[in-house]
Amino acid sequence: MITRRDLIVAFAAMAVTASVSLLAQSKTKPLMRSCLFKWNSLKSVQTKTGERRDVFDAPTATLDRIECHVTTLNPGEAPHPAHQHPEEELLIVKEGSLEVMQNGRTNVVEAGGVIFEASNQPHGVRNAGIDRASYYVLKWFPPGLNTTKSQ
């Protein structure tokens, strides 16, 4: 037989479950729809190696998350040490030239060049020129991708 105590425990569990569900939904970003981003409206934030402009970071209809930012590096600088991560990444060189390390091999890519970084493969970039270098970074996170830390 169901006791009064059983009912109280059941209702309390339902209330906690509903609260957690609502809290999780409130932290979920809305899906990004078709839109555009103007260069002059992107806020530039100074970094120790140059600057960064965040473009977007949101879920879409087919991805858990897609992120885009623009990094500008001062001559000789790298944004961070070589690393790897589970998400794939595309870099498009806007201006300047980058020294690109992928799996122990190094190449130079100039303005207009495109760099693809595969999942879980070591990679890194450094400004190889005498002027500042800027590049777009696009990362996508498909459903079910296990990301513990991403740079």
Image (cartoon, helix red, strand yellow):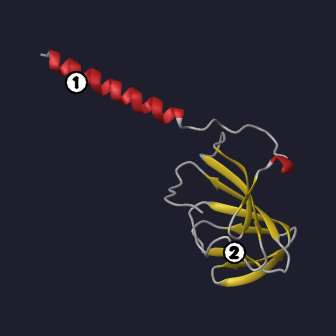
Q: Is residue 48 visible?
A: yes
* Numbered marks: total: 2
Q: Nearest the camera: 10 or 41?
A: 41
Question: For the residue labelled by badge 2, is the local secondary structure a helix, a strand or a loop?
Answer: loop
Q: Quadrant of residue 137?
A: bottom right
Q: Quadrant of residue 3?
A: top left
Spatial distance from mark 1 to mark 2, Cα to Cα? 56 Å
- Give the image location of residue 103, x and y in percent: 63, 80
Q: Amino acid at mark 1?
A: Val
Q: Nearest the camera: 46 or 82?
A: 46
Residue linked to disc 1 = 9
Q: Residue at x 69, y 75 (%)?
A: 78
Q: Quadrant for the N terminus, please.
A: top left
45 to 129, vertically: above or below: above
Residue linked to disc 2 = 78
- Give the image location of residue 86, x and y in percent: 56, 62
Q: Residue at x 51, y 33 (%)?
A: 25
Q: Quadrant of residue 12?
A: top left
Q: Residue at x 29, y 27 (%)?
A: 13
72 to 36, vertically: above or below: below
| Residue 31 appears left or right of 16 | right
47 to 21, vertically: above or below: below
Q: Quadrant for the C terminus, please.
A: bottom right
Q: Amino acid at mark 2?
A: Ala
Of labels 1 and 2, the one closer to you: 2
Residue furthest to the bottom in view is 105
Q: Residue at x 71, y 54 (%)?
A: 68
- Give the image location of residue 28, x and y in percent: 56, 37
Q: Earlier in the sequence, mark 1 or mark 2?
A: 1
| Residue 100 appears left or right of 149 | right
